[in-house]
Image (cartoon, coloured by chain):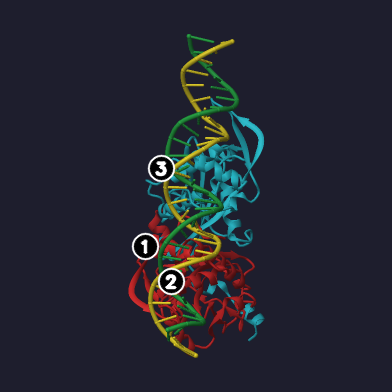
Chain colours: A red, B cyan, C green, D yellow
Amino acid sequence: MNEEEYLQGYDKGAFEAPLLTVDAVLFTYHQDELKVLLVERSNHPEKGRWALPGGFVAEDVDKTLEDTVVRKLKEKTGVEPPYVEQLYTFGGDDRDKRGWSVTVCYTALIAHQDCQTHIDTVSGVAWVKVARAEKMDLAFDHSKILRYAQERLRQKALYSIVPAYALPKKFTLPELQRVHEAIIGKPLQKKSFRRRIEQADLLIDTGEKRSEGGRPATLYRMRAKSGDYTFVRNLEQ
Amino acid sequence: MNEEEYLQGYDKGAFEAPLLTVDAVLFTYHQDELKVLLVERSNHPEKGRWALPGGFVAEDVDKTLEDTVVRKLKEKTGVEPPYVEQLYTFGGDDRDKRGWSVTVCYTALIAHQDCQTHIDTVSGVAWVKVARAEKMDLAFDHSKILRYAQERLRQKALYSIVPAYALPKKFTLPELQRVHEAIIGKPLQKKSFRRRIEQADLLIDTGEKRSEGGRPATLYRMRAKSGDYTFVRNLEQ
DNA sequence: TAATATAGTGCCTAAACGACACTATATGAG
DNA sequence: CTCATATAGTGTCGTTTAGGCACTATATTA
């Protein structure tokens, strides 16, 4: 039998296969708080419980796993997040009552203002303060996934400016530092924080300023590849 | 309908689902070279081509995805590698001729001596120098996966001593440095390399020495959690 | 005009890597 | 036995970059 004959006779459905889903941990920063997007499950299993947004691959629509997660997030928020990165794949026989299951998880970031209006119109979708979400008993193993995403984002905040994607396109350095501090959970040295960003030339000065009661702060926007840049040295841990 | 009724009526096979596999990039270090384990495919599709070791989840045997990858590697090498870490999950409609597919990939490391005898007895399984494997046209998207694993391992070599798992339990510091250099692709400063390992107290002096023609080198073994330790600063990139 | 608030800088210290010369301890040849 | 050679391991200084904190800059508001 050659390969062509094999493929013609092949039936995917004939084999047992774990249930495969894609989930996302979408973070944003709003009112001095890190928040995560949760959805209330409207169907069995775990009906009525809060969970991370996600769903099944649509084989006719999605070309990649990232297509799936972006599509699902767009359904919930109305927009495609500017930052989406694979987090981890959780799998096992005990994480879903329907049987052996696998979920490919992503971390995503978005500016709160870019999707607030859409989320307000959809029921069963909400931004929840991370501090509160941590204490909730989420569906499946989603509490574990959330903790894992927080820890990974925390690491990234120590050696990159990825957290900037949780802010609007234009932002100030004090704002960015506050996001980092919210993620890391402790205050950072202003000088250290600013110096390394300047030295690596990661931001573009828009020429505009924004005032918040004191001296106006310079508004910056990210340079194209700045999200991929990693500092060779971590901030204090 | 309550959840119990829903679960009784639920049939996993009734839904289309991507093909799910688990693959591993198993590295070792032997004769001054970084090597990767490859297997020759004995079945369709891509029959006769070299590929990364891997396979399907066995729902009755495996409790987690890591169980699957460890089981598959044990089939090929006869032993369970001391280091196994999830790498990335690749998925899409074009990576397998059988249709939409997903592979959860792992990086693993093992000492060459711990599995050489077993591998010699199995046909279609071989250690291939990474420099050569890079140039081969592997099955599916395995060439891409190999490159991804190399890059990730290279990063790890800059801020951890994970590469030590590619050596036997007892090893010398010059040996470890050579593994790091093979992975990174350039020479490292002996002093910098040794200093950070000593300062972080990652290794245990076994009291033994090993001579290779000059002054004998101290034999060390890894401390329990040393693989998880990350230096706050990378070596020069 | 002065008090206050927030943004941004100067400058010294500390930690850790880079570079490289130097010492230490084996083996093996004459 | 001694010396050349090879490999292991250390001393030390310069460089880079973060930490710390006081200082300056520029807005608003009483």
**Residue topped by disc 3:** B131
Q: Quadrant of residue A50 in the image?
A: bottom right
| Disc 1 residue type (three-letter) | Asp
Disc 1 versus disc 3: nearer the observer: 1
In depth, the one of B49 and B64 nearer the eye is B64
Q: Which residue is drawn at 48% across and 36% down?
A: B32
Which of the labelled discs sits on residue A173, or is there none?
Answer: 2
Residue B98 is at least partly visible in this image: no
Residue B114 visible (yes or no):
yes
Amino acid type of the residue tagged 2 in the rendering: Leu
Disc 3 packing (10 Å; few <14; some 14–19; many ≥20): few
- Where residue B122 sits: x, y (%)? 54, 41
Label 1: few (<14), some or many (≥20) within 10 Å? few
* Residue position for label 1: A201
Q: Can you give x and y, in whole percent of width and height, for residue A175 in the image?
A: 46, 74
Note whether B183 is above or below B59 in the view shown.
above
Task: Report the residue at 59% width, 37% height from top.
Answer: B171
Q: Mark 3 lies on which chain?
A: B
Q: On screen, C26 above or below A225? A: above
Q: Residue at x 53, y 70 (%)?
A: A181
Marks 1 and 2 share the same chain: yes
C-alpha distance separating marks 1 and 3: 35 Å
> Looking at the image, is mark 1 or mark 2 earlier in the sequence?
2
Q: Disc 1 sits on a residue from what chain?
A: A
Chain label for disc 2: A
Q: Is mark 1 on a helix, strand or loop?
A: loop
Residue B217 placement (x, y as % from top left): 58, 32
